Amino acid sequence: MALIPRLDIAALDALELDPSTKGLPYDAPRLTVGDVASQGWSLLGGDLPLPVAVIRQKVLAANSAWMSAFTAQNDLVIAPHGKTTMSPHLFDLQIADGAWAITAATLQQVGVCQRFGVKRVLLANQPVGTQAIDACFRALHTEGGFELYCLADNPDGVAMLIEGARRNPPPEGNPLRILVEMGFIGGRTGVRTRKGAIELARTIAAAPGLELAGFECFEGMLPTPETADGLIDDVAAMALVAMQEGLFRSDAPVVISAGGSAFFDRVVERFDRVSFPQPVLRVLRSGCYLTHDVIAYAAAFRRIVSETSLKLPEGGLEPALEVWAMVQSRPEDGRTMLTMGKRDVSHDAGLPVPLRWYRPDGSMAAPADMLAGHSVVALNDQHCHMITPIDSPLKTGDMVGFGISHPCTTFDKWSLLYLVDEDYRVTGGLNTFF
């Protein structure tokens, strides 16, 4: 199993930041991304405009190391969802910790990966239309080598890929690698029956320019571990049938993969139940583990810790991504308004949670934990409505740090996030490319 090389971070650090970038101080000098670390900025010192998104660097590194240890001791590799962060700096951290590939969702995201040197991408979608399909085949000709995997779940889509291979023949030895996607009734894409899946696999295996590489699913939308089990079992079962039919190359491992961050323990447990006659590469595609959260994935991880039969590494996943806002007004008893809204923080999987507060007048040595009774009840475009006790210590000008749910939809609201140390001093900047 070949891993992929580190990325061209020097090229990323050399990118100039637009002075109007959200999150930059009003009168910041012209900076490159790499210059951010040397500015001496401090969140608590008032150097950054609020709202602002920050990532605690120590927690981030610990989360990445934890998942690296988990995959290593459970015979997995990881191709983390790059769509979660769309930050090549963070891709590089994941690659340094052993990522086999980076997973993308769109051709734009594939292009970002290529731009900064990712050598293997798993496009977790079926490309359709001439534009997208031709782009896939052109990408295979990238100088220095580039492997691309994508999904397929229906005969018409595969016919388009076959026609794309005729228009744009891939290089010798570097076909477009296809994973047949297993799905479920009421879900997103994916073949709904095992019979349909094996028929699709046969078509792919026989097509010039394409290679049947394996089977996969995305189980993250299912409501319970038990329902996820059935879909993961479909992946293993169909890979076994295709092996028995001789549909795979004999000189490469067969990829079996699942994608969510909520049930990654079940992926291991279910794949472990099957004995395969050929080598398999078990690919996990979780992405949200890197910064974690305080609601949805925090609950999922608590379930994993309490239920799994697997031996887990020491420690665990902790929330690293925070959005900080300022108290703007306390216009009525029991309600506080803050300078943060839907354009700044995720709200699709739960409203942000106030974690800590700080008064930047020199009276507090460090942020204090938020007291009970403070909770967000609504977000507007640029305002946060927080219910607060009558005797809440918060006043106008105080700073509040919020934990988030669903990292994907916080990252996409920021083209620049800051890495900070445990004292909230800025240690670096992260570009995103959404």
Image: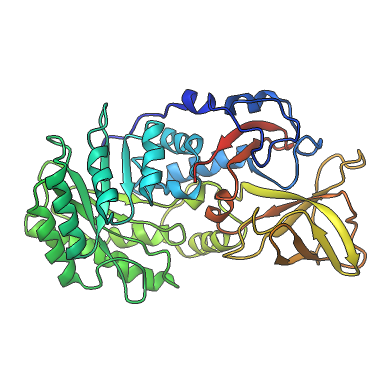
Would you say 63 lies left or right of 286 here?
Answer: right
Q: Quadrant of residue 194?
A: bottom left
Colour pattern of the rendering: rainbow
From the top left corner, tell me how far across and down residue 326 is, in percent. Answer: 80, 50
- Say which residue appears at 12% left-offset and 51% top-offset: 248
- Which of the two residues, 177 or 355, is positioned nearer the viewer here? 177
Which one is nearer the viewer's eye here, 389 or 365?
389
- Residue 270 vs 99, above or below: the answer is below
Q: Residue at x 47, y 36 (%)?
A: 88
Q: Position of residue 398 (x, y in %)?
A: 85, 49
- Is residue 75 visible from the viewing direction of this image? no
Residue 155 falls left or right of residue 356:
left
- Residue 158, position in %: x, y? 18, 58
Residue beneath the point at 61% across and 58% down: 346
**Quadrant housing residue 416:** top right
* Residue 104 percent coordinates (x, y): 38, 48
Position of 245 with respect to 84 (left or right) is left
Question: Could you tell me which residue is drawn at 14 percent across and 52 percent down?
Answer: 163
- Name the outermost residue toward the bottom: 185
Q: Above or below — where is 332 with respect to 315?
A: below
Q: In this figure, what is the number of numbered marks?
A: 0
Task: In the rendered view, tell whether residue 361 sits above or below residue 268.
Answer: above
Residue 226 appears in which quarter of the rendering?
bottom left
Whether residue 369 appears in this view of the structure is yes
Q: Is residue 366 left or right of residue 112?
A: right
Quarter of the image that includes the N terminus: top left
